[in-house]
Amino acid sequence: MKYIFVTGGVVSSLGKGIGAASLGFLLESHGLRIACQKFDPYINVDPGTMSPFQHGEVYVTGDGAETDLDLGHYERFTHSDLTRDNNTTTGQIYETVIRKEREGKYLGETIQVIPHITDEIKKRIRWLGDPERVDVVITEIGGTVGDIEGLPFLEAIRQFWLEENREDVLSIHVTMVPYVKAANEIKTKPTQHSVQKLREIGIQPDILLCRCDRPIGKEARSKIALFCNVQYEEVIEAPDVSTIYKAPLIFHEGKLDSLVIQKLKFSEIKKPNLTKWRRFVEKIENPSYEINIAVIGKYVEHRDAYKSIAESFVHAGVANDTRVHIQWVDSEKLKSSPAFSQLPEYLSDVDGILVPGGFGERGTQGKIEAIRFAREQGIPYLGICLGLQMAVVEFARHVCQLPDANSSEMNAESSDKVVDLMADQKKIFGMGGTMRLGNYPCLICPDTKSWTAYRRENIVERHRHRYEFNNKYKDLMESQGMIFAGICPSNNLVEIIELRDHPWFVAVQFHPEFNSRPNEPQPLFRGFVAAALVHRQDQKYVS
Ligand code: GLN
């Protein structure tokens, strides 16, 4: 088994995740089988309880783990299907070690960071290294070198070299090489310091990926090589890119993959064929059409909060030969608009409206206004999770004449709880990992927009919710024009709703955005973009 560790230095948000995912993609294209993994040094057991403002999107895996958004990059760039084993936090490591200690498994030992915590970390790296399925494990360490919290992870990596053959372990350090305007110069010192910090811990990086907003040039590369104790070719430029999907191509040009293969001493490697990926990138950059989609959310200032949705639009856009411009609309700002008289200001030129998932009452009024606008104006609508629940509330209030209708999450006293807590959620008290999470099947009715999108009856999608459509209101809503287009067969939960007299109004209880891949767009996103494109063309025709 071969192991690659990816660390980051100087500042956060350097794109380590994209780096790790791109490397995974390239190694796969050489015929190697890879497993990607993320370690997060924070103490939360998982990011499920963290605010999207702080942490960005919570990415849900098929087996129902609430994980770091980098796992989304791994799934979109590589073929690995990830599980809870692919994301580990300090919280999980300590939880396991402390539980074992309480069970008396350590037989009287004093429990310490070294070796007990580091052993548990190493165990989780090796878990993934199943030789039947994997040739290389790529482990990304979250945070920045120098963080106190990250130390046990780096120490565990150091120990890895002692326990494995030298040529089976590789360290890649992602760092920043800033351009300082006043000096009109590229500065290598932050990278030198970051590598020094790593070497203090006992890790000599084998390859440096240098993030920069312009070419670094020969001179600076030589300097970095000299001061950081690596060869010139091992200093690889990672310039800013117009789309993240270009990153693997840039790394391939920089010979990252051949260097890794040579260093890890892989023989009989297949030549990569990147044509399909190249074509995909070209299509992102040169589409024939353009549309505007408004995403009405509470966390819009933090772009990463809706990462997978944004990427799904890239994939669905390519499939429709269309560039999707996303207008991020703060749902709180829509709240006060009297009966959406102000809505056109935000939504004047939109071809589609999407309300994504979310929690809590704040911002829901604005979402309801936007949904009403989409319904009444015949604008294509895609609702995701809370976006389904609020569509149900909007329909109940304005079509079914139930003015007090609400979700019991927003108003437990509502006289018409058209969205209510699921029966099995009523007995749950803890918050972490207790929602309805991960894959559940859904049966799609024929002759619906959803069926046209998926072209099949049985689908499986990922979930993350506590509340559900209240089946007591099914007959009433159906009589008023709502279609129940998808149902979870085992418990009758409503999974998809549509509207009868509307060009394209589909809302789903699950999260389709986690199943979209570059050359395999998620069917509903593809259908939504297609409908928005038709809407745009119709508008032009009318005007
Ligand atoms: N807050 C809602 C629920 O828990 C919706 C969740 C979501 O949008 N992910 O059911």
Image (cartoon, rainbow, N blue to C red):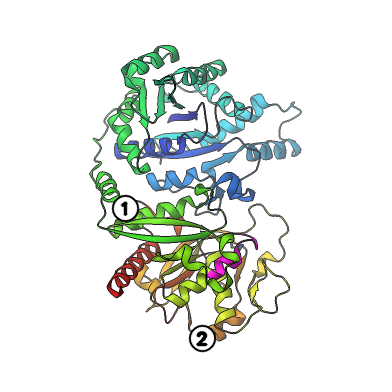
> Residue 53: x, y in percent?
59, 48
Percent position (x, y) of residue 511?
Answer: 49, 60
Q: Residues within 10 Å of mark 1 (few under 14, many from 20)?
A: some
Looking at the rendered structure, the secondary structure element under dot 1 is loop
Does residue 502 lie above or below 272 as drawn? below
Q: Nearer the viewer, mark 2 or mark 1?
A: 2
Question: In the displayed image of the protein, which residue is found farthest to the top?
Answer: 226
Is residue 338 visible in the rendered image? The answer is yes
The residue beneath circle 1 is 519
Q: Is residue 500 magenta?
A: no
Disc 1 residue type (three-letter)? Asn
Image side of residue 98 versus residue 137, left or right:
right
The verdict on label 2 being within 8 Å of ligand 1 is no
Residue 163 locus on image (x, y percent): 51, 22
Q: Is 367 colored magenta in this rendering?
A: yes
Q: Tell me if residue 16 comes above or below residue 56 in the rendering.
A: above
Span shown in magenta: 359-369
The quadrant of the rendered image in which ligand 1 is seen is bottom right
Q: Could you tell me the amino acid type at mark 2? A: Gln
